[in-house]
Amino acid sequence: MSRAHPIYLDCNSTTPLEPEVGKVMRHFFEEEFGNEGSRTHAFGSRAKDAVNHARQQVAQLVDCKMEEVIFTSGATESNNLAILGLAHWGRSHGKTHILSSRIEHKAVLEPIEVLAKDGFEVDWVAPEKNGKVEAAKLLQRVRPTTLLVSLMHANNETGVIQPIDKVAQGLADHPAWFHVDAAQTFGKLIEPLRNHRIDLISASGHKIYGPKGVGVLVVRHRKKQKVPLQPLVFGGGQEHGLRPGTLPVPLVVGFGLAAELGLQHHVEREKRCLTFRRKFLQAIEPLGPKIHGDEGQVLAHTANLSFPGLSAEEAMVRLKNHVAVSNGSACTSASYQPSHVLKAMGLEKDEVVGAMRFSWSHLTPEPDWAGVVAQLRK
């Protein structure tokens, strides 16, 4: 494999664009470029129709209503809106307790920390050694004053799938709002996100083979009660007043199609990813890797592991001409710090320092595994 063309194995940070998605986006960039808020001419009407169609595509994926789909710039904004947007209502109703886990993405950890500094009480639940948060341990900390429970669907570093179904079941008779950061599972694991006890779902277009710069916050109505969110920015009143600003129609259309394709093809995509996973683990088995996260409880397209006696930085330098991998979340990779996720799991220091994340997709070509293994043996 030449230096110019390593195989991309960092799909948990961002995915390649589905060709169909790119094609429809180009049409709305170049030809149907109208503003969906323009009501006086056909350009605006066609743009609005396209946005509504995308809203319906997302709604079908998670089994919600069109009006419960709020388009944002990505899961980070969605997480912030879901968490910070509840603060006013929580204070005014005496609900000032928040429950979350220590393995959440920074886009969840940091907004919650903002509320903690502002007087909210936060319970952080640690995962087990296998990277999974026990639903029972989380649920036993729920109080009458609990405003929000926030738990990711699958961890972005380890790929460990979290028990959101059990948490939703445990909250059936409790009024706390339940938020799920589904950035890694939206359009991939379908049924769990269709649970109507999940009030808020965050996702990004660029994690589901769609464009960067667009995401969604699903805000389900609980019977006739709406989640009492307050907007974080103001001016224009778009997206039911929760997220003002001109919608990027080409990005929204691309997100909608990516959601539809995820619903249509998630089974075959997962099968392809599982085949890739089997070949990968077989190839590196002679090197004695330590895999972080129990097999069978992780996403088909993710493996977090370390090799005895080898730091992640050294391994990535050796592999850079063969495969592109990471040693943690892309949002913090510019200034590397040991993973808060792996530390929360109680891993040994050398395992944390040596941990690398390999993540692929149904679009990923087969690497030269023999070459990869040979580089690591050196």
Image: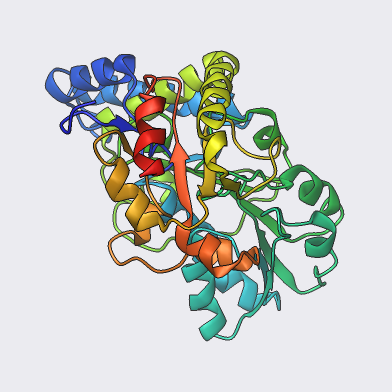
Q: Quadrant of the C terminus?
A: top left
Q: Quick one: 338 or 105, which is closer to the camera?
A: 338
Q: Quick one: 288 or 136, which is closer to the camera?
A: 288
Count of numbered badges drawn on the protein: 0
Residue at image point 53% right, 23% down: 279
Q: Is 344 placed left or right of 369 in the picture?
A: right
For the question of whether residue 230 can be seen, the reply is no
Image height of 257 relative to 107, above or below: above
Q: Position of residue 284 (x, y in %)?
A: 51, 34
In the picture, residue 270 is in which quadrant?
Answer: top right
Q: Quick one: 45 or 102, which is closer to the camera?
A: 102
For the view shown, which residue lies furthest in the left direction? 30
Q: Is 167 placed left or right of 15 in the picture?
A: right
Which of the colour schemes (rainbow, by chain, secondary structure, one colour) is used?
rainbow
In the picture, residue 71 is in which quadrant?
Answer: top left
Residue at image point 63% right, 51% down: 226
Q: Position of residue 90 (x, y in %)?
A: 63, 72
Q: Position of residue 322 (x, y in %)?
A: 29, 33
Q: Position of residue 124 (x, y in %)?
A: 66, 71
Q: Is 64 placed left or right of 319 in the picture?
A: right
Residue at image point 63% right, 28% down: 190
Q: Is 371 placed left or right of 125 in the picture?
A: left
Residue at image point 57% right, 35% down: 285
Q: Quadrant of the N terminus?
A: top left
For the question of whether residue 157 can be seen, the reply is yes
In the picture, residue 120 is in which quadrant?
Answer: bottom right
Image height of 277 relative to 164, above or below: above
Q: Quick one: 310 or 176, which is closer to the camera?
A: 310
